[in-house]
Image: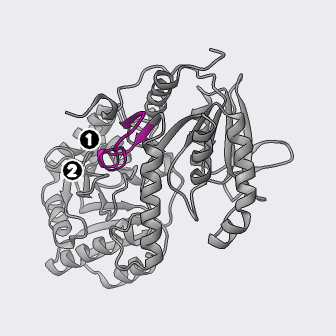
């Protein structure tokens, strides 16, 4: 049995208000204009607004950029809350990071000194700001809260790695373990991170999946059954929605489709994303005949995205690495089953025979067999999709933040002014 300090996070309730001076350290950029408004990516804005609902004294420590990217929106600050910023220098590469390191250190020193509770992580590029902020928080005796959503430094699923990549991976792993074992509270997205990183921890380490779905994104049972009544006709429609990079298993999917093409199997596959593997998808789309393959640009997360999800029968997630993709919960929210790699980030949520299918990572033949099973057994798709819908109720964005607020209060208290 797992020790009490290493179990899955409890179910959420109404979040308490936390009065700590709270500093969130991240590598996700923001823009702040002359009017003081903070503009960020729309999805990040949604998350920051959720933070501010229970953290009225909130400071964002992040790279400040001169101009907002297209589509960025202002952060909505609730009445009674205050959003401050701690501007970190923008770092576009290793050389940039080295030159601007003194500015980064100075900015984080000011931010951490003012803070009472520091929320940070262990990942980032070209190196995590957390590598600077976490030692400061520990040295100054600040309460340290870490969230570990992924381990991008790990080399699984990469064909070739040089000495520099192996060195970076080793240093990143050591530092991640060092910080995780010294923080007061750590949330990880999967049990394997807890087992590998939390070895002699002083605080509490809990498993809490990362999700973005709102309560309104989750279909009712009646709506889900109605959607499946409309899906029963026509060829199998498969959705792959992800960044088009090697670690997401793009080539594995394409090879599986070639296996199905050789069998004369008819199905429709939508690849929703962009990235360096786009050319390989376009080439496969030109070559395949029985399998219809389309490459589409990403759509904004929200109604447009879920409308695209609804147009399919199954979501495929052939990841090679150990991260926990949020698309799994997006699929379950719309009552779609998932065909996924049996990785540390996916196996805790995708259960064969219940809400989806698992295949060995990198095994194109096994992925082809699973998709062929889906093609031949539409009833199993519906049954497993509805089972996924039942499992997603406690895994919404609101529930995730309510759970987090309770855990922070239980670990550190509600704050000096509470």
Query: Which image quadrant: the N terminus?
Result: top left
Q: Give residue 283's position: percent from left, percent from top.
A: 39, 83
Colour mapping used in the image: one colour
Farthest residue, direction right? 34
Q: Tell me if 124 is positioned left or right of 185 in this view.
A: right
Q: In this picture, is 96 found above or below 230?
A: below
Farthest residue, direction top? 418
Q: Disc 1, disc 2: CB below 8 Å?
A: yes
Q: Secondary structure at mark 2?
A: strand
Q: Nearer the viewer, residue 194 or 140?
A: 140
Query: Which image quadrant: the C terminus?
Result: top right
Q: In this picture, is 297 found above or below 11?
A: below
Q: Tell me if 145 is positioned left or right of 195 in this view.
A: right
Q: Is residue 372 magenta?
A: no
Among the two numbered marks 1 and 2 on one chain, the one whose residue lies closer to the N terminus:
2
Q: Quadrant of residue 167?
A: bottom left
**Over which residues does the magenta segment extend?**
186-207
User: Would you name the residue on which mark 1 appears?
Assistant: 388
Rendered residue at 24%/50% (across/down): 347
Q: Give residue 206's position: percent from left, percent from top.
A: 37, 36
Q: Is residue 198 magenta?
A: yes
Rendered residue at 43%/65% (across/down): 169
User: Would you name the residue on which mark 2 appears?
Assistant: 356
Q: Tell me if 135 is positioned left or right of 222 in this view.
A: right
């Amino acid at each position: 049995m797992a020790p009490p300090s290493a179990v899955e996070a409890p179910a959420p309730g109404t979040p308490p208000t936390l009065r700590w001076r709270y500093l969130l350290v991240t590598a996700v950029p923001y823009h702040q204009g002359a009017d003081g408004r903070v503009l960020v990516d729309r999805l990040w804005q949604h998350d920051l607004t959720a933070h501010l609902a229970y953290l009225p004294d909130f400071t964002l420590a992040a790279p400040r950029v001169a101009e907002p990217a297209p589509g960025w929106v202002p952060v909505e600050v609730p009445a009674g809350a205050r959003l401050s910023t701690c501007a970190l220098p923008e770092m576009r590469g290793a050389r940039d990071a080295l030159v601007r390191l003194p500015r980064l250190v100075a900015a984080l020193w000011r931010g951490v000194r003012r803070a009472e509770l520091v929320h940070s992580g262990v990942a980032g590029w070209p190196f995590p700001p957390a590598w600077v902020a976490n030692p400061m928080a520990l040295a100054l005796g600040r309460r340290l809260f870490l969230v570990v959503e992924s381990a991008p430094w790990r080399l699984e699923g990469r064909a070739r790695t040089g000495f520099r990549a192996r060195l970076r991976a080793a240093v990143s792993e050591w530092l991640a373990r060092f910080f995780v074992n010294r923080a007061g509270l750590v949330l990880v997205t999967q049990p394997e991170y807890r087992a590998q990183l939390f070895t002699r921890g002083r605080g509490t380490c809990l498993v809490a999946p990362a999700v973005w779905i709102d309560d309104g994104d989750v279909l009712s049972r009646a709506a889900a059954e109605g959607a499946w009544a409309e899906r029963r006709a026509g060829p199998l429609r498969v959705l792959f929605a992800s960044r088009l990079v090697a670690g997401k298993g793009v080539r594995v999917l394409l090879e599986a489709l070639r296996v199905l093409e050789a069998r004369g199997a008819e199905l429709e596959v939508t690849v929703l994303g962009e990235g360096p593997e786009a050319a390989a998808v376009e080439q496969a789309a030109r070559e395949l005949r029985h399998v219809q393959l389309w490459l589409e640009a990403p759509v904004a997360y929200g109604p447009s995205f879920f409308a695209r999800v609804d147009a399919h029968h199954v979501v495929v997630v052939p990841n090679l690495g150990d991260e926990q993709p949020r698309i799994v919960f997006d699929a379950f929210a719309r009552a779609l089953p998932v065909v996924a790699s049996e990785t540390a980030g996916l196996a805790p949520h995708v259960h064969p025979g219940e809400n989806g299918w698992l295949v060995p990572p990198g095994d194109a033949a096994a992925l082809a067999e699973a998709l062929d099973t889906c093609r031949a057994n539409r009833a199993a798709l519906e049954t497993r999709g509805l089972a996924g819908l039942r499992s997603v109720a406690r895994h919404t964005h609101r529930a995730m933040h309510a759970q987090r607020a309770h855990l922070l209060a239980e670990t550190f208290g509600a704050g000096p002014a509470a």
